[in-house]
Image (cartoon, helix red, strand yellow):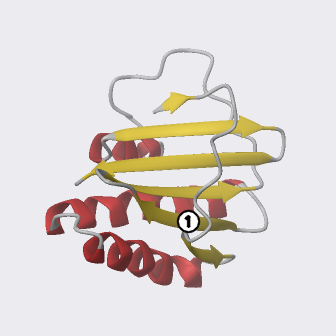
Amino acid sequence: MRQVVRPFAPPPSGAATISFATAHDLAAVREFVGAYAHTSGLAAGRVSGLKLAMSELVTNTLRHTTGGGVVRVWADRTTIISELTDGGTFRPPTAAPPVRPVASGGWGLYITGEVCDEFLYYSRPGHTVWRLMFNR
């Protein structure tokens, strides 16, 4: 996971979009990103990784922010890109995190970082964008 200091360029105008507000929306978001990635040529094993990563981010958004969020997904020539925008403010820990989480919580961002080819975020007060990239 790497923080960027400037906002991301906006997704293309045709990016597929789904909103979520409750835990009841989690399965629909997983299936939405999975179906898009599959039809865009991401290998089956990688599709399951994307679904897992997005599930972790949606769960964190629902647990740590209010108002849910928006997921967008699109493809370029070599990469499936998905992003989640929420109304939270992410502050990375001031101390270096352990190589692997040791508590019962804290695994979501670790797992997401492990399955993505690149995992970035941009945060300012009241607005965070998480961007996941999977090479085809």
Q: Quadrant of the N terminus?
A: top left
User: Considering depth in this image, is 97 or 40 the residue closer to the camera?
Assistant: 40
Q: Is residue 131 above or below residue 23?
A: above
Give the farthest residue toward the top.
95
Three-letter code, disc 1: Arg
Q: Residue 109's spot in the image, x, y percent?
A: 45, 43
- Compared across the picture, whether 95 is left or right of 68 comes to left
Residue where numbered disc 1 is placed: 72
Residue drawn at x 45%, y 81% is 27
Residue drawn at x 59%, y 56% is 11
User: Considering depth in this image, is 43 or 63 the residue closer to the camera?
Assistant: 43
User: Considering depth in this image, is 122 or 74 the residue closer to the camera?
Assistant: 74
Q: Is residue 120 above or below residue 45?
A: above
- Compared across the picture, whether 133 is left or right of 94 comes to left
Q: Quadrant of the C terminus?
A: bottom left
Q: Residue 50's spot in the image, x, y percent?
A: 34, 60
Q: Is residue 6 above or below residue 104?
A: above
